[in-house]
Amino acid sequence: MTETKHITHWIGGKPFDGDATRRGDVYEPATGRVAGHVDFASAAEVDAAVAAAKAAFPGWRDASLSKRTSVLFRFRELVAAHRDELAALISAEHGKVLSDAAGEVARGLEVVEFACGIPHLLKGGFSENVSTKVDAYSILQPLGVVAGITPFNFPAMVPMWMFPVAIACGNTFVLKPSEKDPSASVRIAELWAEAGLPDGVFNVVHGDKAAVDGLLHHPDVKAVSFVGSTPIARYIYETAAANGKRVQALGGAKNHMLVLPDADLDLAADAAVSAGFGSAGERCMAISVVVAVDPVGDELMAKIRERVAKLKIGPGDHPESEMGPLVTGAHRDKVASYLDSGVAQGATLAIDGRETPVLGGAGGGFWLGPTVLDHVTPEMDAYKDEIFGPVLAVVRAGSYEEAMELISANPYGNGTAIFTNDGGAARRFQNEVEVGMVGINVPIPVPMAYYSFGGWKDSLFGDSHAHGMEGVHFYTRTKAVTARWLDPSHGGVNLGFPTNG
Ligand code: NAD
């Protein structure tokens, strides 16, 4: 009999079993077997996590900036030292290949490194003598208990967009990670404890809608950061706001890559294949639509075919694997359904991923190889829906303007890229396109930690993007102080509205 793992909450600096009346299956996508069970939090367990975070807040809020940064630096070193171990946990439950999983840990670490600079980032302003002998200044203070709700596709990196900045700012944190791959968050909690973070500053509750709703309605949760699909992002935004919370909710995506006739087509084909099929297309910044401007469509397609034919799919820990399985069987079936609907609606199935061999002959897993649908048009489901799998749609456009109209009309606005050697065209694109993150000859323009990550339109609800200065702004509130220290010029009672003088 194969052993299954039990994953539970982390509350107040230690594992917390709770009553666990409900549990979810955690799969090993490469074999399809249930590898573990994760406890689903009830309202009482959410209350316990929020209570632990609330109790830890006064001490952490008052911890000096030096104390906070010393913990952050230690945490940075520990995560770096355990990067391969975290990557293995992620790969086993998500399915992505080990190098890709290690890459996500590295990108998350960049946010920890950014947060190590918090003493500089939290500096307010100071104005001397705004009135006679009166000074004014602003200070940035933490909010209290804040919550993060995260998706399956980046079980380490996306939580790390949130908690390093929130904690550095002096808040305490409750994370509700995806129930599909929950182990990395618990290991991260252990590393925080080892780094010396006081108990209760970082907590993890597992679960589904019940746990999320518990956080959204909890009066002691002051802010909610969410990353996931658009319908849930909208729900989180509306519900958290209705409950008086600050909220940022990042949603889904349909990222277009525009290829102009003057582009380097080898570079463009490399980019389309890497960005379309990396992590089996389960990235919010994956390229899901290539828009080839006439007359390059056929030549670009030939180059894409050549490259896809060489891709190797297999278990995440197989040394030759470039692409792993999908996260669950249900998700694989849903993604695969777009192959049939695409053909039925008039697209050409240029490459059928159902026929791709799997390294090591691994049967039973949630496999679907790289798939390309050509001659896709905007009315097709394969164009309209976020597929979130290894299915690349190729659309032909007659001109730059026609391609731009397509991108502007799309409800999503997360990422996009243009491939061209014409600087003027690239500049016009960056100016006109209604998308939050833009690549110029770069297919996955994920901003560095010191910029902020976020899309436009249905890809983000709220006004703050993640990490960078927008993250610091989201997790703090500003207090403006006006101060006068008495001196002999003190002028007595004045009932007029204070003005400068
Ligand atoms: P999801 O929306 O199904 O789940 C995200 C989180 O919400 C999970 O923690 C889940 O438990 C919770 N949740 C699910 N259903 C809920 C409900 N009815 N009520 C309350 N909470 C609920 O997303 P997913 O499938 O885990 O992740 C994939 C999605 O995330 C894709 O749409 C992808 O584009 C998006 N994503 C977006 C970004 C971004 O930065 N914009 C980044 C990564 C992923």
Image (spheres, grey):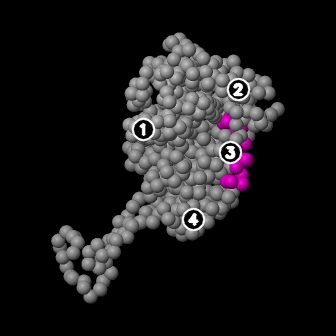
What residue did someone put label 3 on? 102
Q: Percent x, y for residue 466? A: 49, 48
Span shown in magenta: 79-96
On screen, residue 312 versus residue 275, left or right, reads right
Q: CA distance from mark 3 to mark 4?
A: 26 Å
Q: Is most of the magenta stretch helix, strand or loop? A: helix
Indicate which disc, 4 or 2, sits on the residue closer to the N terminus: 4
Nearer to us: label 4 or label 1:
1
Amino acid carrying label 2: it is: Lys
Where is mark 1, residue-wise? 424
Task: Assess whether residue 223 is covered by the magenta stretch.
Answer: no
Magenta span has 85? yes
Looking at the image, is mark 3 or mark 1 nearer the viewer?
A: 1
What amino acid is at disc 4?
Arg
Label 1 CA crowd tier, 10 Å (few <14, some 14–19, many 20+): few
Query: Picture quarter containing residue 192?
Result: bottom right
> Of the residues under marks 2 and 1, which one precedes in the sequence?
2
The N terminus, quarter of image:
top right
- Going 24% across and 85% down the picture, which residue do you hit? 489
Point out the tag, 4 or 1, that comes first from the N-terminus. Answer: 4
Q: Within 8 Å: ligand 1 and the Cβ of disc 1?
A: no
Look at label 1 and name its amino acid. Gly
Type of the residue with mark 3: Ala
Pick whichever of labels 3 and 4 is earlier in the sequence.
4
Measure the C-alpha gap from mark 3 to mark 1: 37 Å
Write the residue at 63% across / 62% down.
73
Residue 88 visible within the image: yes
Spot occupied by residue 392 in the image (x, y as percentages of width and height): 57, 25
Q: 85 above or below 2?
A: below
Establish whether ligand 1 lies closer than 8 Å to the Cβ of label 3. no
Residue wearing tag 4: 68
Q: Is residue 31 above or below residue 70?
A: above
